[in-house]
Image (cartoon, grey):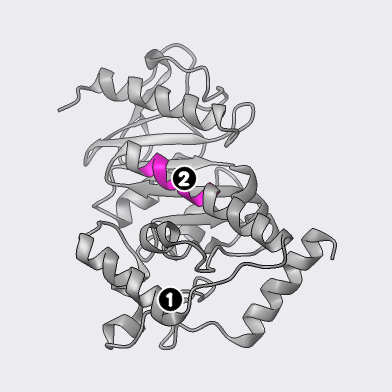
Amino acid sequence: MQNEYEIKKEICDIGKRIYNRNMVAANDGNISVKLNDNEYLCTPTGVSKGFMTPEYICKVDAQGNVIQANGGFKPSSEIKMHMRVYQERPDVRSVVHAHPVYATSFAIAGIPLTQPIMPEAVIALGCVPIAKYGRPSTMEIPDAVSEYVQYFDAVLLENHGALTYSDSLLSAYLKMESVEFYAQLLYQSRVLGGPKEFTPQQVEDLYEIRRQFGMKGRHPANLCPNAKEGKPSCHTCGGDCKGTKNGNASAELVAEITRKVLEQLGR
């Protein structure tokens, strides 16, 4: 089992990874790890995530209050968003927030990542909805994220970035990598004329593989209302799996998403 210092070093390593992969610029982004029900480690505000050392890392309680911070370091101003995830998902041990270029571009364009275009994304991520815009460091972002936390393991933040969370720091980070890779492939395939999506049966087959693997986390394969009723799971739902009896995307939604993408591509 890792001690606190080892976890701090791992946070710094992940910070370097997101910085070196252009998922953040300057002092953007934040990372946290749950130690126990009332102790959390988090990155400080106003510091580049690519140049941290263990003494930079702060410790806060479940309300985000400082327990320990060295020098002039202060916890990330987005700690409220992290705390909301931990509060509503007891299975989560780590949260990563970044601004990956392609995923954030989709968030800015208002387009959720829902098209089933590659097996890994369908099996591991399912859908990635968009939480409505909130002012940074306010309760608006936690409230917006709260709508999706119980149903998805990755969320785009409207005009802001992306948020991923899992049962370990490495897993939370790898989900961020997967979100960005999926977004990049989706964007580039649209430039080439549009992706060829899986059929509903192919999606269901991939969902069954996920179920057989016993993969952890929240995913339409397990939570979709259709799946619970013994029907094929939905996928291209625009992030509406959580509250609809019919998870299939409407023709109007597909048309609207297509229109926005074409506008972004100047076509």
| Residue 210 rendering spot, x and y as whole percentages | 28, 64
| Residue 246 rendering spot, x and y as whole percentages | 44, 88
Q: Nearer the viewer, residue 206 or 69?
A: 206
Question: Height in image: 215 above or below 99?
Answer: below
Q: Quadrant of residue 212?
A: bottom left
Q: Is residue 8 left or right of residue 31?
A: left
Give the quadrant of the N terminus: top left
Using the image, tell me which numbered label, if any, was put on residue 241.
1
Q: Quadrant of residue 80?
A: top left
| Residue 128 rendering spot, x and y as whole percentages | 49, 61
Question: Height in image: 226 above or below 241?
Answer: below
Residue at the far left: name it.
Answer: 1
Question: How many neighbours does mark 1 have within 10 angstroms: few (below 14), some (14-19), or many (20 or more)?
Answer: many
Q: Which residue is mark 2?
A: 176
| Residue 238 rendering spot, x and y as whole percentages | 54, 73
Please name the amino acid that badge 2 sits on.
Met
* Secondary structure beneath label 2: helix
Q: Is residue 201 left or right of residue 143?
A: left
Question: How many neighbours does mark 2 have within 10 angstroms: few (below 14), some (14-19), or many (20 or more)?
Answer: many
What residue span does the magenta drawing correspond to?
Answer: 172-180
Q: Nearer the viewer, residue 157 or 59?
A: 157
